[in-house]
């Protein structure tokens, strides 16, 4: 990831120094294409970068863009995407909320944030090594990127665990 961070930092610096007012900035779609070429070249050189990357943002026409690229350089785009553990547990929740492109256009910002919070709650309770803190970014054409780095899950009581019977040593 550090390699990709340095590579994208260098790309950003080069684009800022070389661009003039009449040249458009890199869009999310352009960035995704660039990353897919980088990942494919590294795979072809038998030196893959073991990352799964999601690129979210706005394309050249200011429409929402969401796509992924994996260590093989394979690209995929869908209304909802997740990586890692989230691809197994959060993706069904996301697909229930946004089954197709039409539903994604009708989804409000508040509904989207609540769906993500529900996903994070499920992921927290299913992974014993996770933390209850996460970051969430909302991207829209009007306000740009709104990043909240200190989101915390509502505190849940584990008191329900005392009533579960059938596992481990128990006194009846």
Image: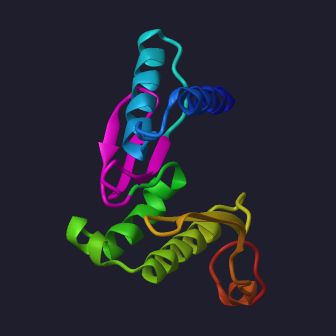
Q: Which quadrant does the C terminus fall into?
A: bottom right
In which quadrant of the rendered view does residue 11 lie?
A: top right
What residue sits 59% from the left and 28% below the top? 17
Q: Quick one: 108 or 164, which is closer to the camera?
A: 108
Relative to 144, residue 68 above or below: above
Magenta-colored span: 53-80
Name the residue at the top extreme: 45
Q: Is residue 48 magenta?
A: no
In which quadrant of the rendered view does residue 141 lie?
A: bottom left
In which quadrant of the rendered view does residue 40 lie?
A: top left
Q: Quick one: 85 or 149, which is closer to the camera?
A: 149
Relative to 70, residue 80 above or below: below
What coloring was used for the rendering?
A: rainbow
Q: Position of residue 16 (x, y in %)?
A: 57, 33
Q: Quick one: 133 or 84, which is closer to the camera?
A: 133
Relative to 18, residue 29 above or below: below
Q: Position of residue 73 (x, y in %)?
A: 39, 28
Q: Is residue 63 magenta?
A: yes
Q: Position of residue 123 (x, y in %)?
A: 58, 66
Name the residue at the front extreme: 21
């Amino acid at each position: 990831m550090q390699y990709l961070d340095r590579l994208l930092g260098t790309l950003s610096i080069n684009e800022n120094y070389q661009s003039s007012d009449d040249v458009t900035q890199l869009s999310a779609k352009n960035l995704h294409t660039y990353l897919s070429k980088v990942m494919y070249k590294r795979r072809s050189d038998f030196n893959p970068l073991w990352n799964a990357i999601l690129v979210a943002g706005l394309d050249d026409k200011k429409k929402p863009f969401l796509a992924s690229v994996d260590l093989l350089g394979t690209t995929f785009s869908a209304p909802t995407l997740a990586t890692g553990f989230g691809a197994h547990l959060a993706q069904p929740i996301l697909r229930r909320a946004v089954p197709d492109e039409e539903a994604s256009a009708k989804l409000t910002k508040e509904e989207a944030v609540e769906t993500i919070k529900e996903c994070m709650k499920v992921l927290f309770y299913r992974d014993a090594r996770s933390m209850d803190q996460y970051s969430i970014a909302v991207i829209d054409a009007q306000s740009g990127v709104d990043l909240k780095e200190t989101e915390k899950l509502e505190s849940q009581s584990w008191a329900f665990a005392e009533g579960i019977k059938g596992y481990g040593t128990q006194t009846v």
